Image (tube, rainbow, N blue to C red):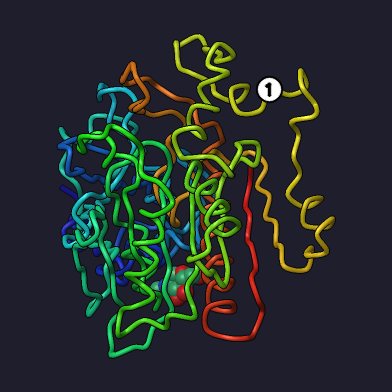
Amino acid sequence: MDRKQCCVKLSVQPSRGLMDEKFIVLVQNVLPGSQLTVYALHQCEGGHSWEAFAHYTANAAGTVNVSEDPSLGGTYSGVEPMGLMWSLRPVPGSKPGLRMRKMNVQTPMEVTVSVYQGHLTEGFVDQVPLAGVVVERWYMAPGVRRIPITEGGLTATLFLPSGPGLFPGLLDLWGGGGRLVEYRAALLASHGIASLALDYVTPKLTKETGKMVDNKYFETAYRVLEQHPQILGSRIGMLGLSFGTSITLKMAVYSQVVKLRCAVCISGSHVQPINSSSEQMLAFNHRNVDKTRFNEENQQIWRDRLLPIPTDPSLKVDMKEMMQRAGNEHLLTVLSYPNAGHLIEPPFTPFARASNFKIIIPPVQIVMVVWGGETVAHSRAQDDAWRKTLVFLRENLYGGSNPAATLSSHL
Ligand SMILES: *[C@@H]1O[C@H](CO)[C@@H](O)[C@H](O)[C@H]1NC(C)=O
């Protein structure tokens, strides 16, 4: 073994941080000009292994700084400070259709970053790395409190920021896949916004009625925020992704109870009839089920189910035009991300072009859905959208007297 190798130093700073925080990976004391592979390995809660790696050449001082130096190949290339996170992908031979989703936000996501000699592309487990460190990435900042909510029949979790408050509040809705998914609300609370993660899809399956929840369910969730002693009842917003955007717009427009200061809609559709029940809204999506296309891997492409355009141009609804007609254009901010996929998540979330999805309208089944997008463009979109969303929420929930604003990103 080369004498120098014993002194290889690998550091990741900070080694413990929030999911949306950048880190700096530094390799020192290697031979000047030597070839190295920096490798990241993560085992998710489902027991699957994810990896990312990149090839570097040490500089004349025997150093690689991942934040400044270009990757010459691997799961990403070029200067990408956080490429080791966003280009994580299931190791070869994994079950298809995996998507990274943290279920227990009270533990961190752990990633082992290692450095190997040479430019490797496989067989990492059979090699001995020159050095390695474990990095912790958290959705919950120190002091954030996690409070399960079951009152009023809710399936929800409230995340309160650290400190006494008062905090602005936010209802956080994921899409039609359901389940109580907490990590985005936890991260928003880490940024000072009391956030309620709400499952509004799965309760249908567990209750006797078999019906989907109605407006009252969302109004109950809103009241939990409004009446909380540490939350500013007059400063509540709503954030939705995918089907969650339809619910968000519906509550903003039709509820007599829910008074939103702002709304964030990610990858939404404006064609669903939001003045109908959740059930009818989902059924609308299924009305065009015969328009589902399949790619060569038998993965479903849903585009023409929600947007049967141009077969019926009358269905084309433009949010901007609608706001213009209502004289409210100034309240709308639209972000557009060409080549990003549907699932715009917090920064550095590994990109899943397609993943397994449980369809909850009978016949219940698990299918593989293509969400689209390209890794680099998608990762840039996640970073940009998240930072702009935080600014938008701060502006509208903390400051100003703006009556009601809407941030709509990427259809
Ligand atoms: C590594 O790169 C980052 C980003 O340019 C810089 O802030 C940091 O000081 C660099 N570290 C070293 C030791 O060069």
Q: Position of residue 386 (x, y in %)?
A: 51, 61
Q: Where is residue 373 in the image (x, y as percent from the top left)?
A: 56, 35
Left or right? Give the position of 259 relative to 134: right
Q: Depth check: 310 or 252 in front?
A: 252
Left or right? Give the position of 137 relative to 347: left
Q: Position of residue 35 (x, y in %)?
A: 38, 46
Q: Depth check: 405 or 346 in front?
A: 405
Q: Position of residue 242 (x, y in %)?
A: 51, 42
Task: Please name the residue shown 58% across and 53% down the image.
Answer: 249
Rendered-image quadrant of the C terminus: top right
Mark yes or no: residue 347 visible: yes
268 shown above or below 143: above
32 shown above or below 126: below
Callout 1 amino acid: Pro
Question: What SS does tag 1 mark?
Answer: loop
Ligand 1 found in image quarter = bottom left
Q: Mark 1 points at which residue?
A: 308
In this rendering, the count of numbered labels is 1
Q: Quadrant of residue 178?
A: top left
Q: Is mark 1 within 8 Å of ligand 1?
A: no
How many residues crowd around disc 1 within 10 Å: few (fewer than 14), some, or many (20 or more)? some
